Image (cartoon, rainbow, N blue to C red):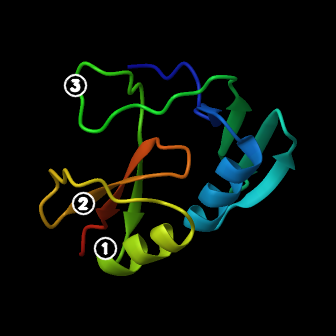
Amino acid sequence: MEKIGDLIMVNLDSPDPRAHAEFYSRALGWDVTASTDEYAMISDGHASIGFGLVDGYAPPSWPDSSGSKRYHLDLYVDDLDKAEAACRNAGAARPDFQPGGDRWRVLTDPAGQPFCICLRAQD
């Protein structure tokens, strides 16, 4: 299949773009490249994640297959326990329902959006 384009950015709805960007900046080690009340962005120099203000934002339920969840991010980590502790220290929460066994964990960011920390495959 011939490639049409390259992914350069993902934009996420947010109740607080600055705080959302700060959380993922800490989680990924990426730089905050824009930060206003209406929009914030982080980047690693190759790809970016933007956070746009949505008035009345309501986080999705977890788990809820019929709910409003439209996306989630997966982050590779080397140690699930250390990564979870660091994410929780930065404002994430851990829902009770955990379908990942010992390979990944579901967390929610400070805006309530689920994301996963996934154990990086060991060579």
- Tell me whether the residue at label 2 lies in contact with that at label 1, contact meaning CB atoms closer than 8 angstroms: yes
Circles 3 and 2 in contact, beta carbons < 8 Å: no
Residue appearing at x 67%, y 44% in the figure: 48
Mark 2 sits on what residue?
104
The local crowd at label 3, few if under 14, some if 14 to 19, many if 20 or more residues have their Cα within 10 Å, is few
Quadrant hosting residue 57: top right
Q: Residue at x 47, y 43 (%)?
A: 112
- Alpha carbon separation for disc pair 3 and 2: 19 Å
Q: Residue at x 78, y 56 (%)?
A: 32
SS type, badge 1? helix
Measured in 3D between alpha carbons, the distance from the residue under mark 2 to the one under mark 1, in whole angstroms, is 7 Å
Mark 3 secondary-structure assignment: loop
Mark linked to residue 65: 3
Other residues around mark 2 within 10 Å, as few (<14) / some (14–19) / many (≥20):
some
Tell me which amino acid carries mark 3.
Answer: Ser
Q: Which mark is residue 80?
A: 1
Q: Which residue is located at x 46 percent, y 41 percent?
A: 113
Label annotation for residue 59: none
Front-most of residues 36 and 104: 36
Task: Identify which amino acid the numbered label 2 is placed on.
Answer: Trp
Calculate the distance from the C-alpha at mark 1 to the C-alpha at mark 3: 25 Å
Mark 1, other Cα within 10 Å: few <14 / some 14–19 / many ≥20:
some
Q: Which sits earlier in the primary sequence, circle 3 or circle 2?
A: 3
Q: Nearer the viewer, residue 104 or 43?
A: 104
Q: Nearer the viewer, mark 1 or mark 3?
A: 3
Asked if the residue at tag 3 contacts the one at tag 1, i.e. Cβ–Cβ closer than 8 Å, the answer is no
